[in-house]
Amino acid sequence: MAAYPTIQANGVTLPSPDELKIADEIIWSANTGRSTTGKMIGDVVAEKQTIDIQWGVITYAEYKKIRANIKSGFHPFKLVLGGETITITAYRGTLSAGAVIHAGSATYIKGASVTIIQQ
């Protein structure tokens, strides 16, 4: 059985996501481009990670916990996945919530998502 990924933002454990996509981005120097011969020139100055997170159906309380800890500005972010731990200082892209579902006295959010971008 596969272990669920563990996500922490600001030291707080958040609900496990349903989908996760990790991209390793290459950051090039400002003078990067094509020479007059068409050859690519420039220097790699850093490698950064972008993490797209999607939740299926979560409670409204879980969504509030996500909103409270994945906020604007830079914050510590930790992802444990398959025995590997990624710890970065990050900021977020748009945090969105999909459908709001009312079931009796409970409220659920379907399709919440966010992009975490390494500083």
Image (cartoon, grey):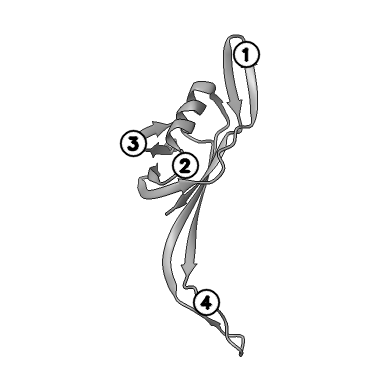
Residue 26 in percent (x, y) is at: 48, 65
First in sequence, mark 4 or 1: give its number. 4
- Residue at 57% across, 14% down: 106
Quadrant (top left, top right, bottom left, bottom right) of the C terminus = bottom left
Q: For the residue labelled by badge 1, is the local secondary structure a helix, a strand or a loop? A: strand
**Kind of residue at disc 4:** Thr
Residues at marks 2 and 4, CA–CA distance in whole angstroms: 30 Å
Q: In which quarter of the image is the N terminus?
A: top left
Circle 2: element type: loop
Residue placed at 46% from the left, 33% from the top?
16
Marks counted in the figure total 4
- The label on residue 32 is 4
Residue count near mark 4 (Cα–Cα under 10 Å), binned few <14, some 14–19, many ≥20: few
Q: Look at the numbered discs 2 and 4 and tell me whether their residues touch, using CB distance below 8 Å.
A: no
Seen at 44% across and 72% down, the residue is: 44
Q: Mark 2 points at which residue?
A: 72
Residue 103 seen in render: yes
The quadrant where residue 105 appears: top right
The crowd level at tag 1 (other Cα within 10 Å; few <14, some 14-19, many 20+) is few
| Residue under label 1 | 103
Is residue 4 or residue 28 the one in the foreground? Answer: 28
- Looking at the picture, which amino acid does disc 3 mark? Gly
Mark earlier in primary sequence (1, 2): 2
Give the alpha-carbon distance from disc 4 to disc 1, as whole Å: 54 Å
- Residue at image mark 3: 11
